[in-house]
Amino acid sequence: MSDRLHRARRVLDIEAAALGTLRDRLDASFARAIDVLVACRGKIVVTGIGKAGVVGRKIAATLASTGSTSVFLHAAEGSHGDAGTLARGDAVLGLSYSGETEVLTLLPVLRRFEVPLIALT
């Protein structure tokens, strides 16, 4: 077996183990997050910055392609004038590696419009 084939299989083994771990960590908070998204009558606004923003754009595009009204809001731009994207009835999916990014600066707007936030950190 070639070294590259061996490495590819090893990567898949590592990823499969990670999915098993993730499966075991799902709990009631995951179900609540899904309930929020299903109940959303407005837009699902996905937000993040940096790599989380890149992933967030893909998530928003995937949600849109499966029939959910969704948009991506860059967290820094949201806190500097684009918060008008948010409205009552929306739900926000905030992505952050550290949990300490510009996503936090959107919290006052989310509270004002009673927009639920699902945080992925």
Image (cartoon, rainbow, N blue to C red):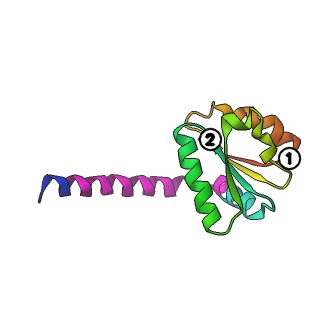
**Residue located beneath label 2 in the image:** 48
Residue extent of the magenta highlight: 7-30
Taking the spot 80% from the left edge, 47% from the top edge, the residue there is: 86
Query: Taking 13 as reference, is 47 above or below it?
Result: above
In this view of the protein, which residue sits in the foreground, 22 or 40? 40
* Residue at screen point 76% across, 40% down: 82
- Are dots 1 and 2 in contact, CB under 8 Å? no
Q: Which residue is mark 1?
A: 114
Q: Is residue 107 left or right of residue 51?
A: right
Residue 94 visible from this viewpoint: no
Secondary structure of the residue carrying tag 1 is loop
Kind of residue at badge 1: Glu
| Residue 95 spot, x, y in % from top left | 61, 43
Mark 2 Cα shell of 10 Å, populated few (<14), some (14-19), many (≥20):
many
The kind of secondary structure the magenta stretch mainly shows is helix
Query: x, y (%) of residue 10?
Result: 26, 53
- Identity of the amino acid at label 2? Gly
Residue toward you, 56 or 80 = 80
